[in-house]
Image: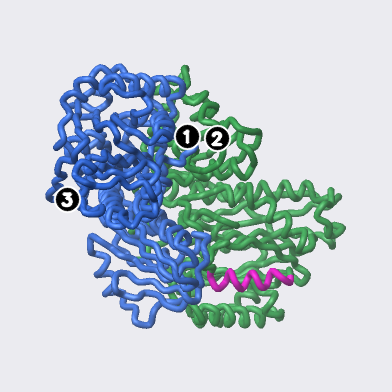
Chain colours: A green, B blue
C-alpha cells in the first residue's frame, strides 16, 4: 500500500524549508484510519479574518468533502482545515455526508468558529465508509497544540502513494510589504486534474479578499495543475485551496480587494510559480515514473488548443510506454497530435526531441539522426516540442512515462 | 516486433472458415517491406460493378492511404484493394503521397481499371517513408493469380502486433436470395477507433448501391468498432471498407438502392453482427491482454452519453490495471464515470461486477461481499454493468486490461 513502493528517481535530496507564516498553525496525528505507524490526520488552524479560495474537481462523482468545501467557499472565510489520508470518503452516500458533518462540527468547536468556516479534504480509497469517530475526538487537542513551523509534517500526513512530500515556498511584495506564500500538495496516481490536483493547500500571510484570491487561483490553475497529468484519470477528490491569513496587514500591507490591482502583479507571479513548482513535483512522483516528460506545444490556434494537444500526448499510453523504453518513437507523437481533435497542419507539423528536430513539413526531418535522438532518450528528463503549424498560441504540459511499476502499483493498491 | 509476443489467451482454437464469395479474389506476397519470412502484401481483386463504402480515421494526421481512400470513395466503385503491413505510410509528406500514387497506378494497370477504382491501406510504423518500389512490380502477378478462397492468408498478411488473424462470416437473405458477408480485420494496439478499427475489410456478394452501403456502415460502426478500445490511442490509419460485388444479382437478387428498403433488414442485422464479432476479436487481441472486459452502461441520458461513460471506464489506466490485478476496485469505476463529463446521478448510481451488485444508491451495496466479487475477478472475461440513474439509454463497450505485457510490447516496438 502507501509508501511500500520504491521512491521516485526524482525525489528531492533535500526538502525546501517553509518558514512559519503568521496566522496559520499545523498539527498532525496517527488516527489509524487505514495506515499503520504513520500520520494520517492533519489540521491547519487559521486566525480570524483569513480569506479562502478554492478549485475543486469537476468529476460528476465528487466526494462528500468536495461538496462540503464548495459550500464553505461561498462565504470565503476560513478558520480550520481538516485533512485525512487513507480514505477518500467518496461514493459513500448518506454516511459520507454524515461523516463530513460530524467532522465539521467537531472542528468548529475546536477553534470556536461556525461550521461554514471549516474546510475538509479526504484522500485514499473510494467507496469505503469513513468513520469520523476515529478522529473527531482528536481535533480539539490538535487545534490547541498546532504549531506554525509544522509544514513538513503536515505535507507528510496527507500522502497516499506519494513517495515524497511536496512543498514549495515563495516570497512576494505587495506595495512595500514582504509577504510569503507556502504550499504543499499530494498526488501520484489517478492524476489528471480537471480543476486542481488531488489535494493542494496554499497559505499566505497577505491580506487579499476572497474574490480576488479566487480569481488568481482560477487563472493560475490552468497553466499549473491543469497542465499536468500522470494517467489521465481525474480524481473524485481534487481539491486546491488557497488561504490568506491577512497577517501582513499588521506590518503595513494595505488589503487588496480589487482584481485588477497593479499591486498584485508580483504576488500573482509568485503564486503561479509556486503552483507550477508543486504541479511538477506531482508529475515527478507519478506512480512508477522512470522519466519526467515535458510537452511544449507551439503554433496552435489558441492556448486551450495547445494545451489539449499537449495533454493528448501526455495521456497517450502507447507514447508514454515508448518513452519508458527510451524509444524516440516520434510517429506516436504524430498520432497523439492527430487524435487530439485540435487543428494541426499535417504538412507544417514539426517535432523536436530535446534539441533535435525529428520531423518537419509533414515528414521526417532531413537532418534526423536516430543515434543522436536514441541517445537523448536515455536522459531522465525528456522534452518534446511540437509546432502545430496553424497559429501562434502555446502551452506546456508535464507528465511521466508509463512503466511496469505503474501497472504493479495499481494492480494491487487495495489488496 | 510483430508476432514475437506470446499469443493472446483469447486466440481462437480454430479460425472460422470463410467460403468463397462470388466476385472477389485474393492474393498475398512477401514483399519484405519490413518483416522477414512472412507475407506483408495483400491484394483483393473485385469484379466490375462492385460498389464500395468506407469509414476512415478522424485523426488530423491521417495517413496518405486514408486520404486516397477518401477520394476513391466519392465515386463508390471498386476494382482492387492493395494493403501492406509493416509501414503505415503516415506522416511521410510528399513522398507518402507519391508512394500511394505509384501504387494506385500499378494496381489500376494490373486489373485494367481507372485509379479511382483503387483502394489502398497501410499499417505499421508511422513516419518512415514507404518505398512503393518494393512491391508495385508484384501487383500484376498477384492480380492474375488471385483466388476466391484465400481469406485467411489475406487476413494474415495485414497483421502487425496481432497474435491471431481476425475473420468472420455471416449469411443473410435479401428478398428470396441468400447472400454472404465475409470480413477480416487487424489491430492490437493504438486502438481507439474514432471511425473504424485500424484496418477492416468486408465483402459481400449482395447487390447494394454505394450510398446504401455507406449508410449501413456509418450506422453500425457506432455500436461495433467505435464501441471498442485497447488503449484510447486513435490511429492515423483507421480504415474500414465494405465492398459489394453484386454477384448475387445473377442469382436473382434485385439490387437494393434505397436506404429504407425493408428487404435490407436481415442483411443489416447480419452486417452489424459480423462487425461486432470482428470488433470483439480486436479487443480480445489487445496488446498484453490478460482479461477481456465488457462495460455495459444503462440509465444514461442518450446512447452517445452511455457510450462515452463506457469508454471513459474502458480507457482508464488505473481501472484497467486494477482489473489486471484481479482487484474488484469499483471505486475506480465511480471515478471513471465521474470523469466522463456525462450526466450521472451520484446518489442513484449502481454498479455490478458480473451478477454481484457492488454499489447502489450512491454507496456500497448492503449485500456486497468482497470474497464473492474477488472470486469473480479471477474469470478471464469480466462484465461490469453501470446504471447511471438519469435516463433510459444504454451502450456496450469492449476492451482489455492494462498489463505489464502492454508496457513491454510498446516499450520496444521499434527497436
Q: Quadrant of residue A414?
A: bottom left
Q: Is the residue B61 above or below the residue B346 in the image?
A: above
* Residue B90 found in image quarter: top left
Using the image, tell me which numbered label, if any, was put on residue B12: 3
Q: Is residue B226 above or below residue B37?
A: below
Above or below, comparing residue A151 to residue B245 in the picture: below
Predominant SS of the magenta segment: helix
Q: Which residue is mark 2?
A: A344
Check the picture and name the quadrant holding the N terminus of chain A.
bottom left
Which mark is first along the chain, 1 or 3? 3
Residue B225: % across, % down: 35, 50
Per the image, label 2 sits on a secondary structure element best described as loop
Please tell me if label 2 and label 3 are on a single chain: no
**Label 3 element class:** loop
Q: Say which element carries label 1.
A: loop
- Mark 3 is surrounded, within 10 Å at the Cα level, by few (under 14), some (14 to 19) or many (20 or more) other residues, namely few
Few, some or many residues within 10 Å of mark 1 (<14, 14–19, 20+): many
Circle 1/circle 2 CB separation < 8 Å: yes
* Discs 3, 1 touching: Cβ within 8 Å: no
User: Could you say which is closer to the camera, residue B5 or residue B187?
Assistant: B187
Mark 2–mark 3 Cα distance, whole angstroms, equals 41 Å
In magenta segment, residue A406: no
Label 2 lies in what chain?
A
The residue closer to the viewer here, B123 or A267, is B123
What percent of the width, then of the height, locates residue B291? 27, 57
Question: Which x, y percent locates residue A132?
Answer: 52, 80
Q: Which residue is mark 1?
A: B61
Amino acid at each position: 500500500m502507501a509508501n511500500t513502493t520504491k521512491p521516485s528517481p526524482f525525489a528531492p535530496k533535500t526538502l525546501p524549508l517553509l518558514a512559519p507564516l503568521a496566522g496559520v498553525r499545523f498539527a498532525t496525528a496517527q488516527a489509524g484510519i487505514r495506515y499503520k505507524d504513520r500520520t494520517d490526520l492533519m489540521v491547519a488552524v487559521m486566525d480570524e479574518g483569513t480569506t479562502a479560495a478554492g478549485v475543486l474537481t469537476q468529476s460528476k462523482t465528487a466526494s462528500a468533502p468536495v461538496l462540503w468545501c464548495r459550500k464553505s467557499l461561498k462565504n470565503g472565510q476560513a478558520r480550520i482545515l481538516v485533512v485525512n489520508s487513507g480514505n477518500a470518503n467518496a461514493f459513500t452516500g448518506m454516511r459520507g455526508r454524515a461523516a463530513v458533518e460530524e467532522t465539521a462540527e467537531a472542528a468548529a468547536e475546536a477553534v470556536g468558529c461556525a461550521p461554514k468556516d471549516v474546510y475538509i479534504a479526504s484522500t485514499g480509497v473510494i467507496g469505503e465508509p469513513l468513520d469520523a469517530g476515529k478522529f473527531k475526538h482528536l481535533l480539539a487537542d490538535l487545534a490547541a497544540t498546532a504549531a506554525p513551523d509544522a509544514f513538513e509534517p503536515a505535507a507528510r500526513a496527507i500522502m497516499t502513494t506519494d513517495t515524497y512530500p511536496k512543498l514549495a515556498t515563495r516570497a512576494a511584495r505587495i506595495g512595500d510589504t514582504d509577504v510569503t506564500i507556502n504550499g504543499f500538495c499530494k498526488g501520484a496516481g489517478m492524476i489528471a486534474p480537471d480543476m486542481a490536483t488531488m489535494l493542494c493547500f496554499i497559505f499566505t500571510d497577505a491580506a487579499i479578499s476572497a474574490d480576488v484570491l479566487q480569481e488568481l487561483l482560477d487563472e493560475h490553475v490552468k497553466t499549473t495543475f491543469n497542465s499536468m497529468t500522470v494517467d489521465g484519470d481525474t480524481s473524485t477528490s481534487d481539491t486546491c485551496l488557497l488561504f490568506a491569513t491577512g497577517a501582513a496587514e499588521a506590518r503595513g500591507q494595505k488589503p487588496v480587494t480589487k482584481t485588477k490591482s497593479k499591486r498584485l502583479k508580483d504576488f500573482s507571479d509568485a503564486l503561479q510559480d509556486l503552483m507550477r513548482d508543486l504541479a511538477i513535483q506531482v508529475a515527478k512522483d507519478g506512480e512508477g515514473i522512470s522519466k519526467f516528460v515535458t510537452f511544449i506545444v507551439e503554433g496552435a490556434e489558441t492556448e486551450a488548443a495547445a494545451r489539449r494537444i499537449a495533454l493528448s500526448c501526455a495521456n497517450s499510453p502507447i507514447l508514454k510506454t515508448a518513452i519508458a523504453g527510451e524509444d524516440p518513437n516520434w510517429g506516436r507523437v504524430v498520432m497523439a497530435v492527430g487524435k487530439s481533435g485540435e487543428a494541426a497542419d499535417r504538412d507544417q507539423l514539426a517535432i523536436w526531441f530535446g534539441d533535435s528536430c525529428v520531423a518537419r513539413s509533414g515528414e521526417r526531418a532531413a537532418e534526423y539522426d536516430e543515434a543522436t535522438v536514441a541517445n537523448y532518450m536515455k536522459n531522465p528528463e525528456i522534452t518534446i516540442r511540437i509546432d502545430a503549424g496553424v497559429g501562434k498560441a502555446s502551452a506546456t504540459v508535464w507528465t511521466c512515462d508509463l512503466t511496469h511499476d505503474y501497472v504493479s502499483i495499481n494492480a494491487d493498491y487495495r489488496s
